[in-house]
Image: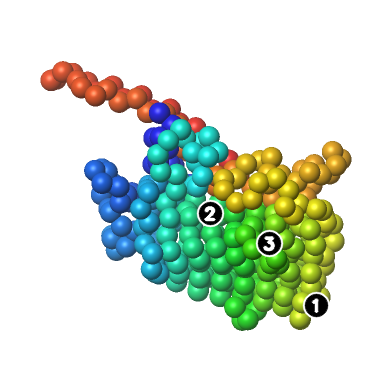
Amino acid sequence: MKKIMLILAVACMTAAANARILRVSNVSGSSAPYASIETAQEAAESGDTIMIDASNTSYGAVTLSINKQLVLIGPGYWLVENGVMEEGASSASLGKLTIMCEGTVVKGLEISSVDIQAPKAVVNRCKVGAIALNADNCIVRQNFITGYITGGKSNTQYHQITNNILHSNATWAYYTIQYIGNSYIAYNTSRLSSINFNGVNNSTIEYNAANEFRKDENYSGNSANNNYKTSLYNSGIKGGSIDSDYYAIELPSEDQGKYGAFAGDSPYILSGVPSGPVIIDLDVPTTVEMGSKLNVTVKIGMVK
């Protein structure tokens, strides 16, 4: 019953001890108490977690603004393609997400773009397009990113951008990280293009892997060492689902585990399944005699 992973992660370790978990599903017939993220947010208090079920229908094509300090957790993405589940919807997708409250955490969602307007936000294990870092001290980690990461010419600072797969579908394009300073940019893999640093300053840039590393205007004061230049372009399939053979870099044996998204202390996780306890099997009897106990068997696993 791997399809039960549509309701991944029953708890969030980062929430306060008295925080609540609010479940959202827009799937017809679902038992979830909320049908939209907006209604769940209205009912939520700061520190609460909103669990978002996988669905074949988007949770919002227009901008969704998060104005409370919440943890949003989806199921991951490409779950069927990567064998996490056997059938069913495999992501919880959104349009543009705007983070307006400090300390907001977003995990395991498929998002067209993220605009971070408050500091100390975390975007983790998501499949996402462009990310705008319009506030300081943000973490962008273990994501599959198809667009750019930019400070919006405001030169925001003190970010951690690590263990992401940077996947520009335009074969001619450079992948751009721009307009940020005093940040740590490491263990990222650019799968189809170069990494173009534009307006990046006073940052540590290391253990990244790409065809090429390009420097544009206002690139200064950076420590850029131990990056790996390799030919990944047009190797194997393009687009579609992710798999370890395609996105792991063909490195010499002595360099395995040293460079790119699958290296370091927080390696990229296939399908972006959020960390924490997950339901991996659930056995519920369809009928039970009046007065008898309903014996439910739940198998819990732990994702690192």
Badge nearest the viewer, 1 or 3: 3
Q: Does the CB distance between marks 1 and 3 fall below 8 Å? A: no
Residue kind at label 3, given as amino acid type: Thr
The residue at the point 79 percent across, 73 percent down is 215
Percent across and percent down for residue 292 are 18, 18
* Residue ID for mark 3: 171
Is 255 situated above or below 189?
Answer: above
Separation of residues labelled 2 and 3 (CA atoms):
22 Å
The residue at the point 56 percent across, 67 percent down is 131
- Secondary structure at badge 1 equals loop
Residue kind at label 2, given as amino acid type: Cys
Is residue 240 or residue 42 the one in the foreground?
240
Q: Does the CB distance between marks 2 and 3 fall below 8 Å? A: no
- Secondary structure at badge 2 equals loop
Is residue 177 or residue 238 the one in the foreground?
238
* Residue ID for mark 2: 126
Query: Residue 88: which quarter of the image?
Result: top left
Percent across and percent down for residue 70 are 42, 60
Separation of residues labelled 1 and 2 (CA atoms):
30 Å
Is 3 situated above or below 51?
Answer: above
Residue kind at label 1, given as amino acid type: Ser
Q: Is residue 46 left or right of residue 178?
A: left
Nearest to N terminus: mark 1 or mark 3: 3
The residue at the point 82 percent across, 65 percent down is 224
Nearest to N terminus: mark 2 or mark 3: 2
- Secondary structure at badge 3 equals loop
Is residue 99 visible in the rendered image? The answer is yes
Q: Residues within 10 Å of mark 3 (few under 14, many from 20)?
A: few
The residue at the point 30 percent across, 47 percent down is 27
Q: Residues within 10 Å of mark 1 (few under 14, many from 20)?
A: some
Q: Is residue 35 left or right of residue 99?
A: left
* Residue ID for mark 1: 220
